[in-house]
Image (tube, grey):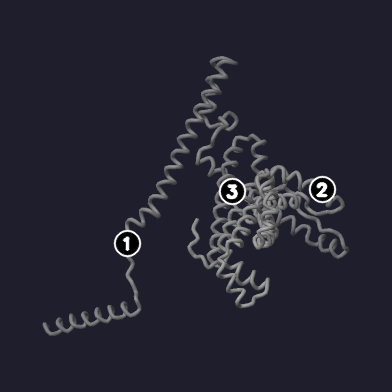
Amino acid sequence: MKQSVTVSKTQEMKLANAAKVVLSKFKIKTPKFEVKTILKKVIVPLASILLFIGLWHMGAKALFNVEANFKIQKALTDQGQEAADAMAACIASGDISCQPNTLPSPAQVWESFNTLIADHKVISADKLAFKEKTAALNEKRIAEGKEPITYTGRPSFVDQIFTSLKTVFAGFVLAFLIAVPIGIVIGLSETLRNSFNWLIQVFKPVSPVVWLLLVFMIVKTMTKDSNSDSAFIISFISVGLCAMWATLVNTAMGVSSVDKDYINVAKVLKLGPLQKVFKVILPSSLPLIFTGLRITLSVAWMVLIAIELLAQSPGLGSFVWEEFQNGANDSNSKIIVAMFIIGIIGFLLDRIMLTIQNMVSFNKNATA
């Protein structure tokens, strides 16, 4: 009996030693539970979110009470005690018709978000039904060379998000196509930089409203006999012109500050002008170019809302303005929903640009 126990222990020791050898050979490390890391990366951010929601709830409740007291006092002053009591009872009952229209609470914003998603599902179902209903007729119209019948109902909140994304993407591409080539050209020549510096400094701070009006004048004239969506064209061109300056400046700066040793190596290798640009200058300038592109994308997303509002393009800008003008009891909470969506999308766009920068640039230490 004792011998069997001794043998089993010996086998266990052998297995343990073998496991250590395997772990050391393949450099397998057992994970360590680091409390400080969990605290910094999980607990503290969650606590800050809860604190923000708590302060928001208390602020909304305080403003609600101020507005409620004002309405009750106004009813007392204008119509007497009976009307004031009726107003107080109506507010306490939660009746929508008499609720104070002020900063919504987190619960109201969440409810409005769910309402907007439900509304999107209804509109999507209507679109699908319309498409199925007009499928045969549209096939006939297309065969006859006519335009198909399209759905003309109101867009949902999700549809407006995608419209804004499409607009900002088109504006960003336009800014890239204008700013990067011009930045490379003026970055290669000090004379050109000095010659065009005044233009950059004058037009860079121009308001998006002014750019919109300028683009509106040109596009309206050029698309008078066209069936294209002029609101979308005006919006994305205005966004591109507003946002391109950071990329232009950073590209010119990156090209002009390339290490002279790299240029000398290009001369020794007898590279042509285009080869020198694409094989030496651009790779060295990528960190600054991508910094400019990240700023351009952020600016494009910020100015988009104002431009969509003025250009009457069916995006998030129009949604916010329509809800503001609507003045319904849930309009404020829907505006807050749009605010959070705008912020989250802006953050995600910046993260996407940072990821692409780390993928294509030799500088892997780029941070937020």
Rendered view: 172 above or below 308: below
Contact (CB < 8 A) between labels 2 and 1? Answer: no
Please name the residue that numbered disc 3 is placed on.
342
Q: Mark 3 or 2, which is nearer the eye? A: 2
Give the CA separation, mark 3 to mark 2.
29 Å
Q: Is residue 337 left or right of residue 202?
A: left
Q: Earlier in the sequence, mark 2 or mark 1?
A: 1
Q: Earlier in the sequence, mark 3 or mark 2?
A: 2
Q: In front: 244, or 356?
A: 244
- Residue 90 screen position, x and y as percent: 54, 27
Q: Is residue 124 left or right of residue 18?
A: right
Q: Residue at x 32, y 62 (%)?
A: 33
Q: Is residue 311 left or right of residue 46?
A: right
Q: Split into 4 quadrants, where in the image is the N terminus?
A: bottom left
Q: In front: 128, or 151?
A: 151
Rendered view: 276 above or below 221: below
Q: Amino acid at mark 1?
A: Phe
SS type, badge 2: helix
SS type, badge 1: loop
SS type, badge 3: helix
Please name the residue that numbered disc 1 is placed on.
33
Q: Residue at x 11, y 82 (%)?
A: 2
Please name the residue that numbered disc 2 is placed on.
220
Q: Amino acid at mark 3?
A: Ile
Give the CA separation, mark 3 to mark 1.
36 Å
- Residue 218 screen position, x and y as percent: 80, 49
Q: Amino acid at mark 2?
A: Lys
